[in-house]
Amino acid sequence: VSPRGSLEQNYSDLYIDVEQWIQSGILDYIAPQIYYGFENDAAPFDETARQWDRLARAGGVPLIAGLAAYKVGKTDAYAGGGASEWIESEDLLARQILFARDLPSYGGLILFRYGSLFDPPEETAEAAMRAQSIWAPLLLEEPSQP
């Protein structure tokens, strides 16, 4: 299942209790949409990823981190002080990949959305190409095992 990155929003807005799903053993994996930058005021990537890691470990399921490739080269209107991070940090996805790989429950990655990577809009094409040159080689490496 691929819920929103915010547990609170899943529960309050969508009326789903992802934590209960994980604890009950009905999931084979969890793939939260951790579509935040490290500088996001409301939900920094590292804190959010660690929260999901704790839940995944407690439930014995792999964590497949959903990353927001579609935000590369764009302003994140919901990030507060981190609104320009996706424009200013070409290595943001690479850092997120490395961070996720170091989590004990790491089971893989999902880069959303295909078109933003391989057929990006003209206004973000250059930024997407620069970012991809940094993160793509990481996918060819074997992640270190915890």
Image: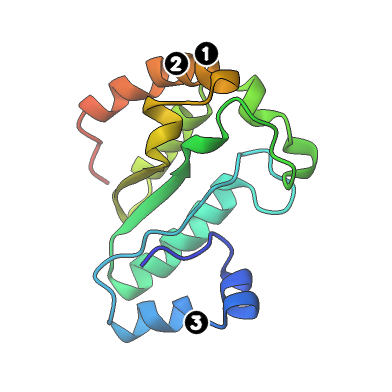
At x 57%, y 83%, the residue is 15
- Mark-to-mark CA distance, 1 and 2: 5 Å
- Mark-to-mark CA distance, 2 and 3: 38 Å
Circle 1/circle 2 CB separation < 8 Å: yes
Q: Amino acid at mark 3?
A: Asp
Q: Residues within 10 Å of mark 1 (few under 14, many from 20)?
A: some
Q: Amino acid at mark 2?
A: Met
Tell me if residue 31 comes above or below residue 96 in the rendering.
Answer: below
Task: Provide the residue designation for mark 3.
Answer: 17
Could you say which quadrant of the image residue 115 lies in? Answer: top left
At x 41%, y 18%, the residue is 134
- Residue 90 appearing in the image: no
Could you say which quadrant of the image residue 81 lies in? Answer: top right
Q: Nearer the viewer, mark 3 or mark 1?
A: 1
Task: Provide the residue designation for mark 1.
Answer: 126
| 49 to the left or right of 38 | left
Could you say which quadrant of the image residue 13 lies in? Answer: bottom right
Q: Residues within 10 Å of mark 2 (few under 14, many from 20)?
A: some
- Residue 146 appearing in the image: yes
Residue positioned most to the right? 81
Tell me if residue 91 comes above or below residue 20 in the rendering.
Answer: above
Task: Provide the residue designation for mark 2.
Answer: 129
